[in-house]
């Protein structure tokens, strides 16, 4: 507390005396340096050791193997889905659709759709599944999404441990990537 007040008084140009000002300045610099070195922000459990010091902005451009737990097997599955960087993983449209369906399924009322409702997700769901309620969609395999045929997407998703729409919505690597990219928007450049 006292060191914070001392640093604050320095920032406001308040000194105690000429000798005290030198001491105060030295202490304030030490406090500021200690504050920087004591910063505990990290995401070490999500990253491989070599990238733990990178900025969020730099991490977004890194390959997906930067994320802790992505080895050759997961890498092959992600690359077959054309997901090679953390940014691409964060932006993956089917992850966002799966998250939307999963989150909104919790707000759904059984038989509650009004007859004049225009609400739909037809651009993302194959025709045969478009009449299903959201609560049923989340239990369906991910190939209910347009462009994800069982043959193309099935093996890739299975290798990632993703079987249903709900699994994709909770896929930790997409969630980590999304959080890294989101945090990068609030990151300041080091001076």
Image: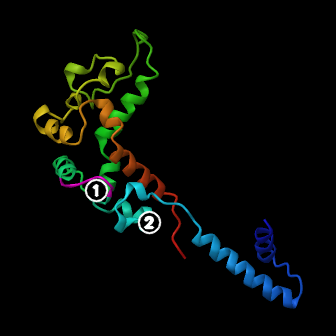
Circle 2 packing at 10 Å, graded few (<14), some (14-19), many (20+), is: some
State yes or no: residue 68 in magenta.
Answer: yes
Q: Which residue ends up furthest to the bottom in the rendered image? A: 19
Would you say 39 lies left or right of 95 here? Answer: right
Residue at the image point whose x is 36% and y is 65% from the top: 49
State how many labels appear: 2
Q: Magenta residues?
A: 67-72
Q: Which residue ends up furthest to the right in the rendered image? A: 17
Residue denoted by label 1: 64
Circle 1 packing at 10 Å, graded few (<14), some (14-19), many (20+), is: many
**Prevailing secondary structure class for the magenta stretch in the rendered image:** loop
Front in this rendered view, residue 187 or 17:
17
Q: Which residue ends up furthest to the left in the rendered image? A: 151
Residue 158 placement (x, y as % from top left): 19, 37
Using the image, determine if residue 75 lies above or below residue 188.
above
Residue at the image point whose x is 21% and y is 22% from the top: 127
Using the image, determine if residue 24 lies above or below residue 165.
below
Quadrant of the drawing holding the C terminus = bottom right
Quadrant of the drawing holding the N terminus = bottom right
Using the image, determine if residue 52 lies above or below residue 113.
below
Residue at the image point whose x is 43% and y is 18% from the top: 108
State yes or no: residue 77 in magenta.
Answer: no
Would you say 20 lies left or right of 112 here? Answer: right
Front in this rendered view, residue 128 or 89:
89
Residue 8 placement (x, y as % from top left): 78, 71
Residue denoted by label 2: 55
Res 26 quadrant in image: bottom right
Residue 120 placement (x, y as % from top left): 34, 24
Q: State if disc 2 and disc 1 touch (CB < 8 Å).
A: no
């Amino acid at each position: 507390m006292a060191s914070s007040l001392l640093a604050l008084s320095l920032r406001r140009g308040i000194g105690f005396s000429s000798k005290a000002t030198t001491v105060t300045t030295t202490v304030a610099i030490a406090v500021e340096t200690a504050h920087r070195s004591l910063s505990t922000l990290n995401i070490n459990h999500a990253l491989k050791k070599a990238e733990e010091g990178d900025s969020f902005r730099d991490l977004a451009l890194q390959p997906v193997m930067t994320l802790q737990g992505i080895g050759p097997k997961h890498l092959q599955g992600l690359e077959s889905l054309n997901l090679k960087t953390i940014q691409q993983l964060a932006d993956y449209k089917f992850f966002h659709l799966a998250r939307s369906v999963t989150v909104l399924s919790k707000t759904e009322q059984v038989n509650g759709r009004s007859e004049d409702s225009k609400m739909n997700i037809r651009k993302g769901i194959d025709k045969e599944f478009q009449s299903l309620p959201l609560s049923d969609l989340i239990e369906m395999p991910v190939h209910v999404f347009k462009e994800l045929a069982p043959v193309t997407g099935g093996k890739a998703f299975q290798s990632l441990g993703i079987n249903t729409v709900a699994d994709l919505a909770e896929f930790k690597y997409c969630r980590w990537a999304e959080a890294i990219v989101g945090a990068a928007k609030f990151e300041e450049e080091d001076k």
